Image (cartoon, coloured by chain):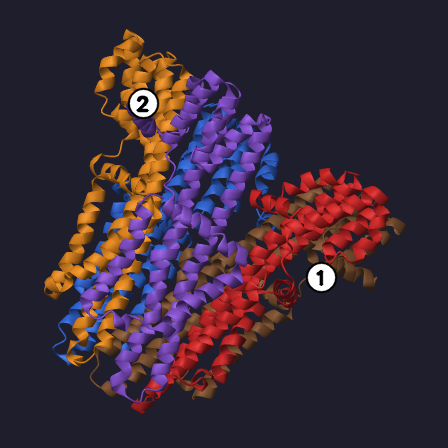
Chain colours: A orange, B blue, C brown, D red, E purple
Amino acid sequence: MDIATIIGIIAGFGLILISILIGGDLSIFINMPSVVIVFGGTLASTLINYPMSDVLSIVGPVKNAFFNEDAKPALLINKIIEFATIARREGILALESQASNAGDEFLEKSIQLAIDGTAPELIRDILATEVAFMEDRHSKGQAILNSAGAAAPAFGMIGTLIGLVQMLAGMDDPSQIGKGMAVALLTTLYGSILANVLFLPLAGVLKVRTASELLTREITIEGILSIQSGDNPRAVEQKLKAFLSPAQREAMKEEG
Amino acid sequence: MDIATIIGIIAGFGLILISILIGGDLSIFINMPSVVIVFGGTLASTLINYPMSDVLSIVGPVKNAFFNEDAKPALLINKIIEFATIARREGILALESQASNAGDEFLEKSIQLAIDGTAPELIRDILATEVAFMEDRHSKGQAILNSAGAAAPAFGMIGTLIGLVQMLAGMDDPSQIGKGMAVALLTTLYGSILANVLFLPLAGVLKVRTASELLTREITIEGILSIQSGDNPRAVEQKLKAFLSPAQREAMKEEG
Amino acid sequence: MDIATIIGIIAGFGLILISILIGGDLSIFINMPSVVIVFGGTLASTLINYPMSDVLSIVGPVKNAFFNEDAKPALLINKIIEFATIARREGILALESQASNAGDEFLEKSIQLAIDGTAPELIRDILATEVAFMEDRHSKGQAILNSAGAAAPAFGMIGTLIGLVQMLAGMDDPSQIGKGMAVALLTTLYGSILANVLFLPLAGVLKVRTASELLTREITIEGILSIQSGDNPRAVEQKLKAFLSPAQREAMKEEG
Amino acid sequence: MDIATIIGIIAGFGLILISILIGGDLSIFINMPSVVIVFGGTLASTLINYPMSDVLSIVGPVKNAFFNEDAKPALLINKIIEFATIARREGILALESQASNAGDEFLEKSIQLAIDGTAPELIRDILATEVAFMEDRHSKGQAILNSAGAAAPAFGMIGTLIGLVQMLAGMDDPSQIGKGMAVALLTTLYGSILANVLFLPLAGVLKVRTASELLTREITIEGILSIQSGDNPRAVEQKLKAFLSPAQREAMKEEG
Amino acid sequence: MDIATIIGIIAGFGLILISILIGGDLSIFINMPSVVIVFGGTLASTLINYPMSDVLSIVGPVKNAFFNEDAKPALLINKIIEFATIARREGILALESQASNAGDEFLEKSIQLAIDGTAPELIRDILATEVAFMEDRHSKGQAILNSAGAAAPAFGMIGTLIGLVQMLAGMDDPSQIGKGMAVALLTTLYGSILANVLFLPLAGVLKVRTASELLTREITIEGILSIQSGDNPRAVEQKLKAFLSPAQREAMKEEG
């Protein structure tokens, strides 16, 4: 998504760190066995549930969400109109050189298909299949992150129960109760932070991002097919603006 | 919505304040680090999940819910019948002067489209698109508020766990246990109040308001198209009353 | 619903009262500030969420559920067969006098429409609209009661947290801890009772009642249209019995 | 269902009893006021929600689930094929004597309808209606048991809160705290046992049983109609085996 | 699924074991009565809910998920193309010898049906029925595992409540409180581990596996029908690759 995703994650962890430092020493919040049981347990439960390949395949969309800015539909439409103008003036083959630096893999592929003279129905089929698999990949990613977001607090609780049992069973020195309890609670804290600052919001990111990528890809498909059928740039613009909200159309008008 | 929304929020926070003051000092309920972790954490988690532009776009509908009174379908129908009468008597162009002070942006826009002689199907298309984007904006707003309503108690719990760990780890002075615990519980209290007095009811407001705006906008679209097609005021009235409940129709009859 | 609703509510509150009295004094369970925060907070949160008019409109269906006995489909069918017999023998206008004391507003209205010679499709339209609005009103009522059933325990917890913080912060006299805690827990108790004895079961009542009223109204509509079309009483009976379960049909046979 | 349902309930309660007896005296787990508030409260809340007649009507299907063995589709198909052979050889009236000892009320009724020469469409209508009402009755039963399964823990918590308030408010003798707390926790224990050993699994039983009865009743309807239309036993067998899983078909082949 | 499932389960239990051993003695975590109530109770509640035969039938798919590697669609397609080549060159009967060592029961059965000259529609029907029953069996398995995943923590809590009541009622020796509490908490720990390391992830495995088996079986059905209709291997390849994601198609291209 936009810069907000990174700001949000840094802010989330930062606020927790600050609120810990205000209260005292950071070291009492670090406990390796607690880290191992919560992180390890969450990972283990995810690996049981999903095949390794699916778990690894969420890295792509998540990295995307951080480092690729969300495509702005208005910019995309302007670029496609530009392509339509070139195609109209110099023929569709003139897009060859443009395709390679469109800066958007899906758009490049679409142009290439159009230049190659692929039949329109086939272009639509090929691109729609790719969109369907993108959706499928993202929804698997959401499911995995949501499942990790449920597993983390559960393993946090398991860790706390283990700590409590150990503390209560060996309660020889009452003055150590507080310290034992503090350590026991750490896993619950870790699980809660992992779920609420990381897994659940990232699952949400993929959901929002999927909706937004679907829109830009539908715009691309319609635009390329319109260019290929020889529509004039103004007709292409009319078709694509139907995908924008009234507010976005106003914004485009002012800019253009 | 109506005045009840503002009364509700003031009453909600007021009751909590009063019940605090009855029990003693307000100052023990104010703790800046606790405020920071709950408000900040909730905001951070929302920013990770949703693009900045979506988060900012909920201000509009929420402000609307507070300061614009909910459109009364019966009043709207009366106004449209009035317009139908004018259009019938003096021609549709006579609505030009009325449009500017209809006091309802959507109604004004609809009249303007009709006056401009836009084709009926196009009017319906343009207005339906705007309604669809309004619905979409509101349902995004609901999703964001519901997600904030889930994040606030979660960060409240995270704050309480941090406080408990600090208190338990440094339990040198047993007489301070009570005070430490009190501070630790404050974040859970903040999170609970934020979610139950603010975020969740506001998400509900947007849902109720969306349903009610959908109705008034459908009435507007049908009414304007009926006026444009030259229907007489009585026929316009018949068409639009189908949108009212029997009770509302009774009420209109008594007034008129 | 039937008498069970009232018995249930009295029994629910009665059992709680008895179990309190067995354990000792009732006075320790009464605390005005606790009452105010739970009742007031629940009301405030409901008022934020729903427009005042919707909140007030649930009084009708709820009162109905208590004081109007649930219509027995078999009795209704017998009454309609009786009307069919009269209409067959003396003409449909002879139902005029019957209509006024049918003891069921919807049935009366249906008969009146048939007597007025309204076209069958129009009768069906008018009555179906009224049924749709009844359903809508009841489902709003359910939503409001369910939302109150979620708000009550939440405000109970907010009250308990406030009480705990006050008790813990001012823990000068350890012998007072128990009393403070007891008072703090009262709001959670109130919220729990309100939700589980009142709001949630009443939401259930409206759901069950809606299903049962839908059935009787469909029977009424089919019956009146059948009478108006001049069907003989035996044909009316055949049509309407399709709405009954085999057991109910057996019961009717035995009675008749 | 099969014997497993009874074994399950006895085992569930038995295990709890054993684990209590291992730990000591049973008498500390018996407390009449606690029994009254949990059982009574659950019943009260169910009576508010559902009409008395619906609550009583779940006794039938639940008793059925215990004492009638689940119909085996393969056995039913064999019996129907046998009937088809008789009907083919001696005419459909020869089934009269078989009908009365088919040991399955629905099958008997179906045969009787076929013998009476009822038109096939009417047979299908009559039997389908009965199946629809069976489904409806079972799904009501599920809803009631699920609602009781939610009410029991809620009343358990209400009872515990009452007990805690009484114990904390009257905390004169600290040595009695433990005993008071023990009694207070009993209601939560009762509610938890009722929900998890009784109500929720029984709701599940009705769901599973409904699916299995639907299958056998569909098989019966198709089989009887096939017999009535004079199909030869082999054709009847072909039609009905489509309802079996490949594994069940293998099993039938081996037996037959 | 792939090796990850076994690694996940071993890692899940291993991590918990390690984190226990780091903290001290394993023996304090073993308590037979606690084991009995959680395992036994979960089993009892599952047996009440589901017929014995359904409970036993989940062993197959779960074992499958562990020991059969997930079919790779690309490998399957290559094998089917190979069969198509043989069938084209030597006639479909030449597949007879291949069928027996295809290493995939469903594929073998499909080939056998094709060799036997079964009509295409009948092949599709027979195989689709088998797929439907596979889906049904898996979804029952999921439901049972999810229900066990809900029952385990519930019986954990019941066990803890029993332990707490016994400890609190017999609180003669305050120094034993800790030990009693430790034992009481064990059942909650067991329930939590069972649900989160075993039942819930295994329910997830069946869901993921069902989706993946559905894909390979659809590929098999389409492939065999294509071979039977005499399509050339290249046409078979074109048809089946439509089931692959673009990435999988790339991978096939590189290999082939």
Calculate the distance from the C-alpha at mark 1 to the C-alpha at mark 2. 73 Å
* Mark 2 chain: E
- Residue at numbered disc 1: C72
Compared to residue E64, the image places residue E174 above or below, namely below
Residue D163 at least partly seen: no
Residue A45, image x, y percentages: 31, 52
Work out which quarter of the rendered image holds the N terminus of chain E and state it: top left
- The x, y position of residue E30, in whole percent, is 31, 71
Residue at x-position 35% and y-position 88% = D170
Q: Amino acid at mark 2?
A: Gly
Q: Quadrant of the C terminus of chain E?
A: top left
Q: Which quadrant would residue A195 be assigned to in this image?
A: bottom left
Question: Residue drawn 61% across and 36% down?
Answer: B234
Residue E150 image offset from top left, x and y in percent:
42, 60
Q: Which residue is mark 2?
A: E256
Say which element carries label 2. loop
> Could you say whether the residue bearing mark 1 is in a helix, strand or loop?
loop
In the rendered image, the vertical position of residue D42 relative to residue B94, given as above or below: below
